Amino acid sequence: MTIEAKRTVTIPSQELPVSYTPDVVVVGGGPAGIAAALASSRNGARTLLVEQRGYLGGMATAALVPAFCPYTDGEKAVIRGIGLELLDRMKQEAGGDYRELNEDKIDWVPIDAEVLKRVYDEVVAESGTTLLFHTAVEQVLVEGETITGVVVNNKSGRSVIQAKLYIDATGDADLAALSGVPFHKGGVEGELQPGTMCYLVAGADRAKFQAFLEETGQSLQLEKTVVEAQERGDLPAGRKRISGIAWVTPYVAGFNFGHIFGVDGTKAEDLTRAAVEGRQLIARQMAFLHRYVPGFENAHLVHTGDQVGIRETRRIVGDYTLVVEDFLTMRTFEDDIARNSYFIDIHLAHAGSAMAIKHLPKGESHGVPYRCMLPVGKANLIVAGRAVSSDRPVQGSLRVMPNCFAMGQAAGTAAAMAASGGQGFREIEIKGLQERLTRQGAWLGVGERRQTAALAGSVIEFEEEC
Ligand SMILES: Cc1cc2nc3c(=O)[nH]c(=O)nc-3n(C[C@H](O)[C@H](O)[C@H](O)COP(=O)(O)OP(=O)(O)OC[C@H]3O[C@@H](n4cnc5c(N)ncnc54)[C@H](O)[C@@H]3O)c2cc1C
């Protein structure tokens, strides 16, 4: 029998069961989604958290991103609330070797991915959130401005989840895109930050490595050794340093090293190529570590990311778009739900191009308005995490995990308020949301912030990035 190849196929219409009817459904269990689900449940809403993988954590566990970016502005914690609570809990539950190295850190805290997965399972269960793994949203049902359901696919088959409020924490704004919300992707020519396949090695020797850094006068990013290996053809051209090494214990280290270019994280073919290229690149990097880097002679590769780490895809068009001028002038908004002090960190889109890094001065931050999370034209949908409404430079700053926790906490709290009042996201009282966030540990800058003039001239270059 021959089957004619066609360009498109019409699928017969199908009657689907309704599998869940929560007040609030959170789609995506990365930092934004976890915080959103906890906040929603703790504020009284019946909450369902849907995640396509078999564990929570998003990029930190699926892509093995090795560390949490700073929680502080260099002087005080800017990200508090649920984000800080989860960081503390991971530290408490990690082993003695981990704590000895990392207990007092709050900036650039290494991630013990297996402990983090378990901690997330526990806190989500404690909050009363219903958790559904191995389930992906593939379609959004819309009537005018209202989402009436999401179609999910899992081993049980296809079904519909009908909630009052929807939180898109997919990182890629999947729900927003599927429901017709306009979005931007990448730069003016469609360029995207590269992906990185992160990994974990065991059997390393931190003390020996530290001695090597001191002896050669270089930072943790091995700027001299990487260039030497590139010049000899032992590493590919491109970024001239390691983006990050995070010591989980004195003998286990996580790596964020090298780039894979031209990857659109919303395309399966690109993700496939990046997975293959990423593992090949890691094989070269392991050979480099064995040969060039004392302390890693006997290191063994134990785990690579389940997927390549993706830094940027879609940015929704929201009621407000946070732009670089807001960042540089450290603007405060009436509807702030968080503050951000992390620097603008845009990785090179091509092997030959430069990285953009811009810092705010120590002790400074800008506001993140609630309206950035509200996609235009949708009444009961909110977006939290790296896909919120911003220009590209601001996305390069807002995207890091502590900020995603803060935005998630705000989105979940707003959802619970809206659910109890039978409202949409634009109808809740913003002052009430801000008071509740502050009461529940978040920091919105009140009392500890000063307004400063434009800073474009005083932006400084910095070396750490993720
Ligand atoms: C290489 C790299 C290094 C980085 N370094 C750092 C660092 O050092 N420190 C730091 O703080 N940040 C770092 N970041 C940034 C940070 O990890 C991400 O920006 C952050 O995790 C985004 O959080 P999120 O919750 O928005 O999305 P994600 O973490 O991407 O989580 C989204 C979740 O949604 C799920 N999902 C997606 N689509 C669907 C769907 N349709 N149905 C169901 N589930 C779905 C995914 O499986 C995932 O679990 C790095 C990122 C990369 C890629």
Image (cartoon, helix red, strand yellow):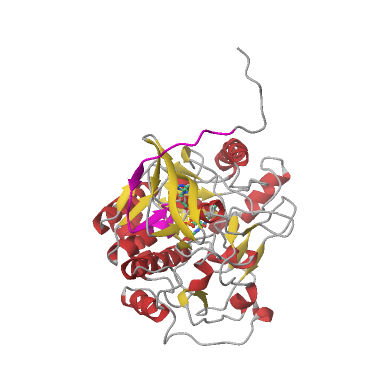
User: Residue drawn at (66%, 57%), measured in percent from left and top?
Assistant: 186
Q: Position of residue 257 (x, y in %)?
A: 58, 49
Outermost residue toward the top in this view: 1
Q: Position of residue 433 (x, y in %)?
A: 38, 76
Q: Is residue 463 visible?
A: no
The front one of 46 and 164 is 164
Q: Position of residue 174 (x, y in %)?
A: 52, 51
The front one of 260 and 300 is 260
What is the span of residues highlighted in magenta in the rendered image? 10-34
Side of 121 where 154 appears, left or right: right
Q: Name above or below for residue 105 compared with residue 304.
A: below
Q: Is residue 272 magenta?
A: no
User: Residue drawn at (46%, 42%), measured in percent from left and top?
Assistant: 201
Please state, as top left, top right, bottom left or bottom right, where the N terminus lies in the image. top right
User: Residue drawn at (29%, 67%), measured in percent from left and top?
Assistant: 43
Q: Position of residue 96 (x, y in %)?
A: 29, 53
Q: How many marks?
A: 0
Side of 316 where 57 appears, left or right: left
User: Residue drawn at (67%, 52%), measured in percent from left and top?
Assistant: 239
The front one of 100 and 365 is 365
Q: Image quarter for residue 315?
A: bottom right
Q: Is residue 69 visible?
A: yes
Please state, as top left, top right, bottom left or bottom right, where the C terminus lies in the image. bottom right
The front one of 208 and 372 is 372
